[in-house]
Image (tube, helix red, strand yellow):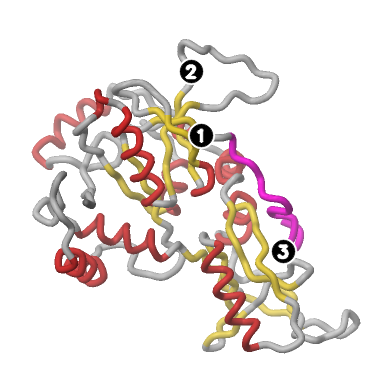
Amino acid sequence: MATLFGVRGGGLFGKGDKSEDKNEKEADTNLKMYPAMKQEEIEEWLEHIPVFMVTDKNGSAIVMRQNETSICYFFMSPVMANATLTQLQSSTDNLELQVSAFSLGRIWFRILKANKTQEVQIKFPGASENEQQETIKGVDYRLIPDTRDLLGARMLLTMGEDDAVKEGGTLTPEVAQAAIKKAMTSSPKFNGTYNEIPVFVIQQMRVVKQVAEGETSDSKNPETMLPMYFSLQSMVSTWQKFTSQSPETTGMEPAINLMDLSELVELMQKESAIDWRKVILIPQSNVATEEGSAGNSAVSVDSPSKMPGMGQTLGDL
């Protein structure tokens, strides 16, 4: 049996009923406001998220030409990066290629959001170190989301209450096909194939912050963070495992919210009623054993670990 969750409005990102706008504005005047995050803070916030690119053996980016446009691709999914590697290897001779991992924090502002007119030196395949390099402008750096999460985001945005499969119901092939067709044709966002990265969150979930080496913690009142996931499947699986082990949360409906990563970063750079410093991004490989108390939906996550060599190539990042 499969359960499909629709996006529900809530206190985090949901807009709610328009008739409540006036009351909400009055309440907003009493909200505590948190200062905007600096660029350095956001880079650190993104530091542990790996992205992947096809490079040469020295870690230099592979620039592709498409309709007179020079393009470099970063991938959220290593599987998609490896598929691109295989395709390029089959179409190029005597060129040693590999998939290299980079820190999203290091490339977000310096490359993905940098001035597109900056000059970049490129070297053609097979050229020697002494041969003159070509200088080009306007390399288009593209961040490619996992296609599964892109489809999941579209489905969440197009799914109404009548489309949801209630607990105990059956997801038939016909229902699934109809939902996918609607997602592919009617989604108001995430219709592109790059630079729109969906981020998923369940408002009731919290993760227990891991204490850094040398620091002390309050075991009775551990600090918790709001987890945001790049993987919809990982988030839903974590939620289902926790609720299945906690009688107090049985039947609790998850309030799922969805945002675009670029829009999220823009919000973090402004004064906000949300304390973004209490939010953590969860890569697929970092989900650990669930634990927590009723009503808190807390899970414990390992401290983000850097991948070997992450961010050490692609020039001087």
Distance in Å between CA atoms under marks 3 and 2: 39 Å
Residue at x-position 29% and y-position 33%: 243
Q: Which amino acid, mark 1?
A: Val
Give the labeled residue for mark 3. 314
Q: Earlier in the sequence, mark 3 or mark 2?
A: 2
User: Is the C-beta separation of discs 3 and 2 under 8 Å?
Assistant: no
What percent of the width, then of the height, locates residue 98? 69, 70
Q: Is residue 305 magenta?
A: yes
Which amino acid, mark 2? Pro
Instruction: Name the amino acid, label 3.
Output: Leu
- Alpha carbon separation for disc pair 3 and 1: 30 Å
Labels in figure, total = 3
- Mark closer to the observer (3, 1): 1
Magenta residues (range)? 303-317
Give the secondary structure at mark 1: strand
Quadrant in the rendering for residue 86: bottom right
9 sits left or right of 82 in the view: left
Closer to us: mark 3 or mark 2? 2
- Dominant secondary structure, magenta: loop
Closer-to-camera residue (169/74): 169
Q: Is residue 164 magenta?
A: no
Crowd around label 1: few <14 · some 14–19 · many ≥20 (10 Å)? some
Q: CA distance from mark 2 to mark 1?
A: 13 Å
Name the residue tied to disc 1.
301
Q: Is residue 103 left or right of residue 123?
A: left
| Residue 222 - label | 2
Sequence-first disc among 2 and 1: 2
Residue 104 rendering spot, x and y as whole percentages: 58, 53
